[in-house]
Amino acid sequence: MQTIFKFVLLGAVVLAPSYGHNLWITAEDGSIRIVFEHSMQPGAGDYNDDIVACGKTWVRTPEGKTSPVSIQKAGSPGKAFLAGSTQVVKGPRSVEFSCVFGIYKGRMDYFYGQFLDVANDQDLARLAKANLPIDIVPSLSGDTLTFQVVYEGDALPNHRVAIIGPDGSEQKFRTDAQGDLVFKPTAPGVYGVWSVRLDDEVTGQHKGEAYKGNMHATSLAFEWPIGR
């Protein structure tokens, strides 16, 4: 499937627009671009050094082969982003990201994300599960998608999920008792699905600094319709 600037929203501090930073990935052929701003546009890049230092990016194929992607700072002042390249230049492929971001306002933050470049439901099924600590696992039946939010192997019931449509609008949902969310896209284009798990009680230390609470933010992005 031809890939033209497909966006991945990797997370935000809370489930509301424009709070904290979001991490976006775009992929076009062998080029990968990461933007860590309030929006998907390059900006000040205040945390780009942190993302380079903490993040791991890779491409995974249906056969289970993975290829690491190195990212570095790019752009210009006020239009800063991160760039990398891969030899896996077309789908089916999954571009994935994992980051131990560190302590933010006394809380330990983690970001994860996945971008699926697939042409059919078989490719989707083979690549759907990224095996990240928190996953949004999609499945396709006709013109309807089901997303299951999984944390450390267990589905998360009644859990908050946000879906970003091709026009940039956001809808908020909760998973059902099985941790599933059934969703029928209404327009073609790139969708971003993201969820955040907060644990206010966990405590620990990171690099000698104590923290209380943690956040695991994850996302999934894909182009609809599958196989377009």
Image: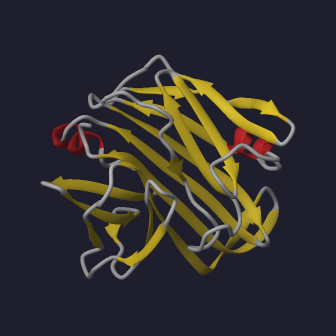
Q: Position of residue 84 (x, y in %)?
A: 62, 26
Residue at figure coordinates x 58%, y 47% from the top left:
24
Toward the viewer: 45 or 113?
45
Toward the viewer: 189 or 37?
189
Q: Quadrant of the C terminus?
A: top left
Q: Is residue 25 left or right of residue 131?
A: right
Toward the viewer: 7 or 122?
7
Q: Position of residue 161 (x, y in %)?
A: 43, 71
Indicate whether 64 appears above or below 140: above
Let me know if residue 157 appears in the view: yes
Q: Position of residue 34 (x, y in %)?
A: 63, 39
Q: Position of residue 219 (x, y in %)?
A: 47, 56
Q: Quadrant of the N terminus?
A: top left
Q: Is residue 70 left or right of residue 76?
A: left
Indicate whether 16 appears above or below 101: below
Indicate whether 203 appears above or below 109: below
Count of picture labels: 0
Q: Residue furthest top?
A: 87
Q: Is residue 205 left or right of residue 188?
A: right
Q: How is the image coloured?
A: secondary structure
Residue at figure coordinates x 61%, y 69% from the top left:
17
Q: Is residue 48 left or right of residue 219?
A: right
Toward the viewer: 209 or 53?
53
Let me know if residue 70 appears in the view: no
Q: Residue furthest right?
A: 77
Indicate whether 60 appears above or below 195: above
